[in-house]
Image: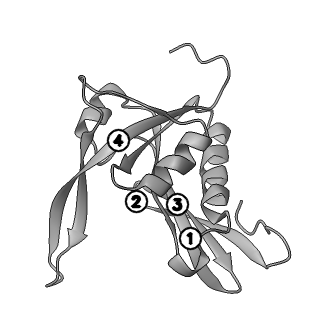
Amino acid sequence: MNGKFLGANAAHFERSVDGEYEIFTLIENGQEVGSNKLAKSPIHEPALANLFPNVLVAYQLFVVEAHRGRGLASLLMDAVEQAARDKGAARLLLGVVVENVIARGLYERRGYEYLEVDGNQTVDSVWNIKNENGKQIQEIVQVMPMMLHLKQNEED
Protein backbone atom coordinates (compact mmCIF):
# COMPACT_ATOMS: atom_id res chain seq x y z
CA MET A 1 0.00 0.00 0.00
CA ASN A 2 2.95 2.31 0.52
CA GLY A 3 3.02 4.66 -2.45
CA LYS A 4 -0.30 3.49 -3.88
CA PHE A 5 -1.75 6.33 -5.94
CA LEU A 6 -5.42 7.13 -5.60
CA GLY A 7 -6.21 9.08 -8.74
CA ALA A 8 -5.28 12.24 -10.54
CA ASN A 9 -5.16 14.32 -7.36
CA ALA A 10 -1.70 12.89 -6.53
CA ALA A 11 -2.94 11.27 -3.33
CA HIS A 12 -1.20 8.20 -1.99
CA PHE A 13 -0.87 6.15 1.19
CA GLU A 14 2.20 5.93 3.33
CA ARG A 15 2.32 2.96 5.65
CA SER A 16 4.47 2.85 8.78
CA VAL A 17 4.75 1.16 12.16
CA ASP A 18 4.87 3.00 15.47
CA GLY A 19 4.96 0.78 18.55
CA GLU A 20 1.75 -1.23 18.68
CA TYR A 21 0.21 0.46 15.64
CA GLU A 22 0.45 0.07 11.89
CA ILE A 23 -0.32 3.56 10.59
CA PHE A 24 -1.94 4.42 7.27
CA THR A 25 -1.39 8.05 6.30
CA LEU A 26 -3.12 9.58 3.31
CA ILE A 27 -0.93 12.18 1.58
CA GLU A 28 -2.26 14.59 -1.03
CA ASN A 29 -0.08 17.16 -2.77
CA GLY A 30 2.62 16.59 -0.17
CA GLN A 31 0.32 17.18 2.83
CA GLU A 32 -1.15 14.70 5.30
CA VAL A 33 -4.95 14.80 4.85
CA GLY A 34 -5.91 11.81 6.99
CA SER A 35 -4.78 8.74 8.86
CA ASN A 36 -5.96 5.54 10.47
CA LYS A 37 -4.27 2.94 12.67
CA LEU A 38 -4.43 -0.83 12.98
CA ALA A 39 -3.53 -2.64 16.20
CA LYS A 40 -3.11 -6.36 16.89
CA SER A 41 -5.58 -6.28 19.78
CA PRO A 42 -7.74 -3.88 21.83
CA ILE A 43 -5.07 -1.70 23.45
CA HIS A 44 -7.28 0.93 25.08
CA GLU A 45 -10.42 -1.03 26.05
CA PRO A 46 -9.84 -3.54 28.88
CA ALA A 47 -13.32 -5.08 28.52
CA LEU A 48 -12.75 -5.74 24.81
CA ALA A 49 -9.23 -7.04 25.39
CA ASN A 50 -10.68 -9.75 27.65
CA LEU A 51 -13.33 -10.79 25.10
CA PHE A 52 -11.34 -10.35 21.88
CA PRO A 53 -7.64 -10.68 22.77
CA ASN A 54 -6.50 -11.55 19.24
CA VAL A 55 -8.87 -9.50 17.09
CA LEU A 56 -7.35 -6.66 15.07
CA VAL A 57 -8.62 -3.17 15.94
CA ALA A 58 -8.95 -0.02 13.83
CA TYR A 59 -8.08 3.10 15.81
CA GLN A 60 -8.13 6.86 15.40
CA LEU A 61 -9.64 7.43 11.98
CA PHE A 62 -8.97 11.09 11.21
CA VAL A 63 -9.44 13.37 8.21
CA VAL A 64 -8.27 16.99 8.24
CA GLU A 65 -11.36 19.19 8.52
CA ALA A 66 -10.75 21.03 5.23
CA HIS A 67 -10.73 17.68 3.40
CA ARG A 68 -13.83 16.12 4.92
CA GLY A 69 -16.82 15.17 2.78
CA ARG A 70 -14.67 13.82 -0.08
CA GLY A 71 -14.76 10.12 0.79
CA LEU A 72 -11.28 10.07 2.30
CA ALA A 73 -12.47 8.36 5.49
CA SER A 74 -13.80 5.53 3.33
CA LEU A 75 -10.43 5.26 1.55
CA LEU A 76 -8.68 5.06 4.91
CA MET A 77 -11.09 2.38 6.13
CA ASP A 78 -10.62 0.47 2.85
CA ALA A 79 -6.86 0.44 3.51
CA VAL A 80 -7.15 -0.78 7.10
CA GLU A 81 -9.78 -3.40 6.25
CA GLN A 82 -7.65 -4.73 3.37
CA ALA A 83 -4.59 -4.86 5.61
CA ALA A 84 -6.61 -6.88 8.14
CA ARG A 85 -7.71 -9.28 5.38
CA ASP A 86 -4.10 -9.57 4.18
CA LYS A 87 -3.15 -10.65 7.71
CA GLY A 88 -5.81 -13.38 7.55
CA ALA A 89 -8.21 -11.67 9.98
CA ALA A 90 -11.84 -12.71 9.90
CA ARG A 91 -13.04 -9.78 11.99
CA LEU A 92 -12.11 -6.16 12.62
CA LEU A 93 -13.07 -4.34 15.80
CA LEU A 94 -13.32 -0.64 16.56
CA GLY A 95 -14.76 1.68 19.15
CA VAL A 96 -16.54 4.87 18.19
CA VAL A 97 -17.21 7.78 20.53
CA VAL A 98 -20.94 7.86 21.26
CA GLU A 99 -21.37 11.49 20.15
CA ASN A 100 -19.56 10.96 16.83
CA VAL A 101 -22.70 10.44 14.75
CA ILE A 102 -20.91 10.99 11.43
CA ALA A 103 -18.34 8.24 12.09
CA ARG A 104 -21.04 5.92 13.39
CA GLY A 105 -22.96 6.38 10.14
CA LEU A 106 -19.85 5.61 8.10
CA TYR A 107 -19.20 2.41 10.02
CA GLU A 108 -22.84 1.34 9.83
CA ARG A 109 -22.83 1.83 6.03
CA ARG A 110 -19.70 -0.31 5.82
CA GLY A 111 -21.41 -3.18 7.62
CA TYR A 112 -20.04 -2.79 11.14
CA GLU A 113 -22.40 -4.06 13.82
CA TYR A 114 -22.72 -2.77 17.37
CA LEU A 115 -21.65 -5.10 20.17
CA GLU A 116 -22.96 -5.28 23.71
CA VAL A 117 -20.47 -6.09 26.44
CA ASP A 118 -21.97 -7.38 29.68
CA GLY A 119 -25.31 -5.86 28.66
CA ASN A 120 -23.79 -2.43 27.98
CA GLN A 121 -23.69 -0.58 24.66
CA THR A 122 -20.55 1.33 25.68
CA VAL A 123 -17.18 0.42 27.16
CA ASP A 124 -14.40 2.46 28.72
CA SER A 125 -11.57 3.43 26.41
CA VAL A 126 -8.42 4.68 28.13
CA TRP A 127 -6.72 7.42 26.12
CA ASN A 128 -3.28 8.85 26.84
CA ILE A 129 -3.44 12.55 26.06
CA LYS A 130 -1.52 15.71 26.91
CA ASN A 131 -3.27 18.27 29.07
CA GLU A 132 -3.04 22.05 28.58
CA ASN A 133 0.32 22.04 30.44
CA GLY A 134 1.75 19.37 28.14
CA LYS A 135 1.64 16.70 30.84
CA GLN A 136 0.70 13.16 29.78
CA ILE A 137 -2.55 12.09 31.45
CA GLN A 138 -5.11 9.32 31.00
CA GLU A 139 -8.68 10.11 30.07
CA ILE A 140 -11.48 7.55 30.06
CA VAL A 141 -13.91 7.95 27.17
CA GLN A 142 -17.08 5.96 26.52
CA VAL A 143 -17.01 4.24 23.12
CA MET A 144 -19.48 2.00 21.35
CA PRO A 145 -17.75 -1.19 20.20
CA MET A 146 -18.45 -2.27 16.62
CA MET A 147 -17.35 -5.34 14.67
CA LEU A 148 -17.00 -6.05 10.96
CA HIS A 149 -16.92 -9.63 9.68
CA LEU A 150 -14.32 -9.62 6.93
CA LYS A 151 -15.04 -13.13 5.67
CA GLN A 152 -18.44 -14.54 4.74
CA ASN A 153 -17.99 -17.91 6.45
CA GLU A 154 -17.00 -16.71 9.92
CA GLU A 155 -17.84 -19.36 12.51
CA ASP A 156 -16.87 -17.74 15.81
Give 50 or 141, whichever is nearer the viewer: 141
Q: Amino acid type of disc 4?
A: Met
Of callouts 4 and 3, which one flags the residue occurring earlier in the amino acid sequence?
Answer: 3
Residue 107 in the image: state x and y as whole percent.
54, 45
Labelled disc at residue 19: 2
Residue to which mark 1 is pinned? 34
Q: Looking at the image, which residue is at 28% across and 27% down?
A: 117
Q: Amino acid type of disc 2?
A: Gly
Residue to which mark 3 is pinned? 36
Q: Quadrant of residue 28?
A: bottom right
Q: How many marks?
A: 4
Q: Quadrant of residue 46?
A: top left
Residue 37 in the image: state x and y as whole percent.
49, 57
Q: Residues within 10 Å of mark 4 (few under 14, many from 20)?
A: many
Of callouts 2 and 4, which one flags the residue occurring earlier in the amino acid sequence?
Answer: 2
Labelled disc at residue 144: 4
